[in-house]
Image (cartoon, helix red, strand yellow):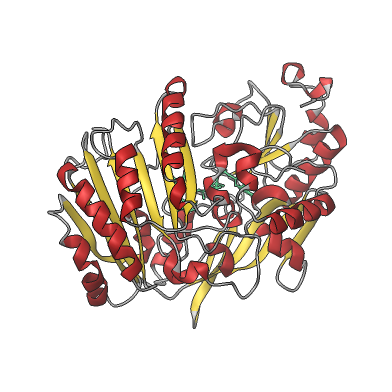
């Protein structure tokens, strides 16, 4: 990538960025300046990033100024809220950081409610604001991710089979498109942009805020059952048989886990190979318990943490790690997950295989997720039956064996592959991986829109389609 000489990191500060700085309300951090390292460091510490500068946007106008400056100087632009989905080292980019765009307004109404969130707002803030009015938002397994980053990639969470993708609940998006123009996209105004921003991630613009619906759902019946090493095989097979019987009020996933002994990891799970059955039933708790009974009977749980749960505490279902860590992830979509697939998974990543993965997860999809939304969006692959996701944690030089093990695992599951992946689970897979998040037709439409809304190709780094 060509960076104008005056903007190369070694020539800053006091180089070209001063002109931009004068037009901003928020700070701009260049390498070596206070704030740069903190903001340029993503949640996933495996990716060391080196943007040319970080613009900490104070408002939408700052985002627009940044994009216009980048266009005038031939700089690529990246956006970051939390760095959970970091895709590349961002070398030479102008990184627009959204953490200060943290507005979070929750408005109850007769039929649930709605929320408006700035693009730096995380689901943690939304869930907190939802607790008192007894509302639920469709957040993912890890509430620490930003609403904008998650929802722009579809957003498939622990209630996805019941309520579908988060992006289908969005009613309005404020965005600065690649041409520097602030626009409001809804189904009526800018319908093509509205289509592309819900599923297309950051390919068309930088979202500054969004409005979406909340459900009148103070409580769910949910949590996780944990079983010890001896039960892993049996529980996984029974889970594979059980999933197709479930109603759409139930969403489940299963995780083979090897959690290290460290603070925050419950003693019964620490340092052992365990299996977790995650479960959310959005309905009568007694019915929820009845549907879960076959899994409770699949073995002797070492921890049974399923019961009535405030929906604002939905993050406890997966209990994903909150602190930054160096991680290597891989993912695939599966058409089906019969017992034979469970066997193949166990052969590659079960107890005794010396799998280097911290976690190998299968999520059941289907239900409401497979319904065609009332307002079409760029989110594809809604008919996939299951999602496979692996994550391994190690100091970066030791991530290579984790990645090659994950590649082998995906290969051994290829007989059940649906094809493609989801944009939110393709962060480290480069342009080809990101493109695989879409059908050919959707990808063409996204590229055509990008040509119109991002004429200078500012968004050419990270999770964007190749043009
Ligand atoms: C532990 C963990 C659990 C997860 N669980 C789920 C899950 O259950 N379901 C699910 O769907 N996903 C899940 N994800 C994926 C997560 O939703 C994506 O990584 C998401 O992109 C994170 O958004 P972020 O803004 O917090 O991260 P960032 O790294 O800051 O941003 C990632 C990308 O999101 C886009 N983006 C961010 N902000 C904007 C913006 N303002 N405008 C336009 N585009 C933007 C950009 O493409 C950006 O590169 C999980 C990820 C992790 C690490």
Q: Residue furthest right?
A: 72
Which residue sits at x=73%, y=65%?
185
Q: Residue furthest top?
A: 10
State the residue in front, 137 or 116: 137
State the residue in front, 246 or 20: 246
- Residue 100 location, x and y as percent? 60, 46
Quadrant that contains the C terminus: top right
- Residue 420 location, x and y as percent? 56, 50
Looking at the rendering, which quadrant does residue 365 occupy?
bottom left
Q: Is residue 37 above or below residue 226?
A: above
Which residue sits at x=46%, y=73%?
215
| Count of labels in the image | 0
- Residue 373 location, x and y as percent? 59, 72
Q: Residue furthest left?
A: 300
Residue 285 lies left or right of residue 422; in this view the side is: left
- Residue 390 location, x and y as percent? 41, 41
State the residue in front, 439 or 429: 439
Is residue 144 among the parts visible in the rendering?
no
Q: Is residue 8 above or below residue 203?
A: above
Is residue 6 among the parts visible in the rendering?
yes
Q: Is residue 106 above or below residue 100?
A: below
């Amino acid at each position: 990538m060509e960076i104008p000489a005056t903007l190369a990191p070694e020539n800053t500060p006091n180089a070209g960025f001063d002109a931009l700085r004068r037009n901003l309300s928020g700070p701009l951090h260049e390498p070596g300046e206070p704030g740069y390292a903190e903001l340029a460091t993503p949640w996933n510490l495996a990716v060391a990033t080196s943007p040319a500068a970080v613009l900490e946007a104070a408002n939408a106008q700052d985002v627009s100024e940044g994009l216009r400056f980048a266009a005038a100087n031939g700089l690529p632009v990246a956006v970051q809220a939390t760095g959970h989905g970091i895709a590349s080292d961002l070398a030479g980019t102008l990184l627009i950081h959204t953490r200060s765009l943290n507005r979070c307004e929750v408005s109850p109404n007769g039929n649930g409610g709605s929320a408006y969130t700035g693009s730096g707002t995380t689901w943690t803030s939304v869930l907190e604001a939802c607790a008192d009015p007894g509302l639920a938002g469709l957040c993912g397994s890890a509430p620490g991710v930003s609403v904008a980053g998650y929802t722009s990639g579809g957003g498939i969470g622990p209630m996805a089979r019941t309520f579908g993708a988060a992006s289908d609940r969005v009613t309005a998006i404020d965005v600065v498109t690649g041409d520097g123009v602030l626009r409001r996209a809804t189904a009526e105004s800018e319908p093509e942009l509205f289509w592309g921003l819900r599923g297309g991630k950051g390919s068309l613009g930088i979202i500054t805020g969004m409005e979406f619906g909340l459900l009148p759902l103070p409580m769910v019946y949910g949590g996780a059952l944990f079983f010890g090493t001896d039960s892993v095989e049996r529980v996984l097979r029974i889970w594979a048989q059980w999933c197709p019987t479930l109603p759409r009020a139930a969403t489940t996933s299963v995780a083979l886990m090897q959690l290290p002994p460290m603070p925050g990891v419950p003693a019964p799970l620490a340092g052992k190979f365990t299996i977790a059955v995650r479960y959310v039933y959005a309905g009568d708790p007694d019915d929820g318990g009845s549907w879960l009974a076959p899994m409770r009977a699949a073995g002797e749980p070492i921890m049974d943490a399923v019961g009535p749960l405030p929906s604002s505490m939905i993050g406890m279902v997966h209990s994903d790690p909150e602190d930054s860590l160096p991680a290597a992830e891989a993912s695939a979509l599966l058409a089906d997950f019969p017992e034979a697939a469970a066997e193949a998974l166990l052969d590659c990543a079960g107890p005794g295989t010396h799998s280097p993965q911290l976690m190998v997860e299968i999520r059941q999809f289907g239900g409401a997720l497979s319904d065609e939304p009332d307002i079409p969006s760029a989110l594809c692959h809604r008919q996939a039956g299951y999602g496979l996701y692996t994550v391994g944690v190690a100091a970066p030089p030791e991530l290579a064996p984790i990645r090659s093990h994950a590649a082998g695992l995906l290969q051994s599951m290829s007989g059940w592959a649906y094809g493609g992946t989801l944009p939110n689970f393709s962060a480290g897979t480069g342009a080809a991986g990101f493109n695989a998040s879409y059908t050919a037709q959707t990808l063409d439409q996204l590229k055509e829109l990008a040509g119109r809304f991002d004429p200078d190709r500012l968004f050419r780094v990270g999770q964007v389609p190749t043009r």
